[in-house]
Image (cartoon, rainbow, N blue to C red):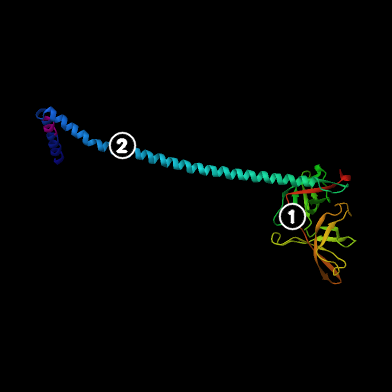
Amino acid sequence: MFQRKFFYSLFSYLVIFLVVWNVFLPLVFRKKLQKFFFSSQVPLWRVVSKMEEVQKAVALQTSSKSWWIEQGKEWMRENAYLKLQLARQQDQIELSNRVLQLNQMEVGENFQCLPARVLYRSYETWSQWLLINRGSKDGVCVGQGILCTQGIVGRIQKVTEATATVELVTNPNFRLLVMVEGDPIPHLFKGELQKKTCEKPFHGILEDISEAREKPYPRRIETTSVGHQFPDHIYVGDCVQANQKANRYVGIIQLGDYLKHLDVVGVLIPWTDL
């Protein structure tokens, strides 16, 4: 009931206003009043226009900032990708250089050095075995020597058509006749089990080293061509000390750290096997 009366009253006031506006008020007065009304609205329209411009500017600035942020992230991703590609290319170049050095190694007239990639090396047997990508189809046979540009690595223990298992020089089952600096007769070298392969250097043992007290240390250990597995004078390690056991001396051989980071090796294939 109240709402109905309110609307009736409002309608009545509106009708009275229109009658007064159109009948009783002079035309000139109405024009002046309209002009005053519109002129009073101009500052408000300007404020609204300015607010719209500010909103557009803020939106544009926010959009531009977001665009630059995303663009910066994209550039960072591209930079990281290019660095990765560059590192891979550098690794490939270094790998190619090591292969080239293997091909240029002096291995004597009785051997051919066949480069091979290391495919696999288990952490549990890090100092004992590794797998290479050469097999019987490449002329690889059991017993052939393995080396790298820095020295001896081991020998072939097992062969398939496309791969071969290498017994490392640090394997406790490894045996090899070697020459000791300052000693004219060969000695038997054998590997030593490594319990902490990353923290400590690799070692081997030299059986029954003669004149241990009189010779200075370290003494260089090299391969001998006896057995036709390696040519002469391939580096094996350094005899750093001699320990007395019963009535004989046992040499402690420190092997190179290169054995921990093998990616390319060379298979010594005798020319008689080709």
Query: What's the distance in space between the residues labelled 1 and 2, CA to CA?
Result: 75 Å
- The quadrant in which residue 55 appears is top left
Type of amino acid under label 2: Ser
Q: Residue reaching furthest bottom?
A: 246
Q: Residue at x 77, y 49 (%)?
A: 265
Q: What residue type is labelled 1?
A: Tyr
Q: Is residue 133 left or right of residue 55?
A: right
Left or right of residue 237: residue 41: left
22 sits left or right of 187 in the view: left
Secondary structure mostly seen in magenta is helix
Callouts 1 and 2 close, C-beta under 8 Å: no
The image quadrant of residue 79 is top right
- Front residue (pair 195, 271): 271
Query: Counting residues from the N terminus, which is met first, the one under dot 1 or under dot 2?
Result: 2
Give the residue pinned by disc 2: 49
The stretch of residues the image draws in magenta is 14-19
- Residue bearing the label numbered 1: 258
**Residue farthest to the right?**
184
Q: Is mark 2 on a helix, strand or loop?
A: helix
- Measured as percent of width and height from the top left, residue 48 is found at 29, 38
SS type, badge 1:
helix
Q: How crowded is mark 2: few (under 14 residues within 10 Å), some or many (20 or more)?
A: few
The quarter of the image holding the C terminus is top right
Tell me the tag on residue 148. none
Residue 188, position as x, y percentages in the image: 86, 61
Q: In which quarter of the image is residue 259?
A: bottom right
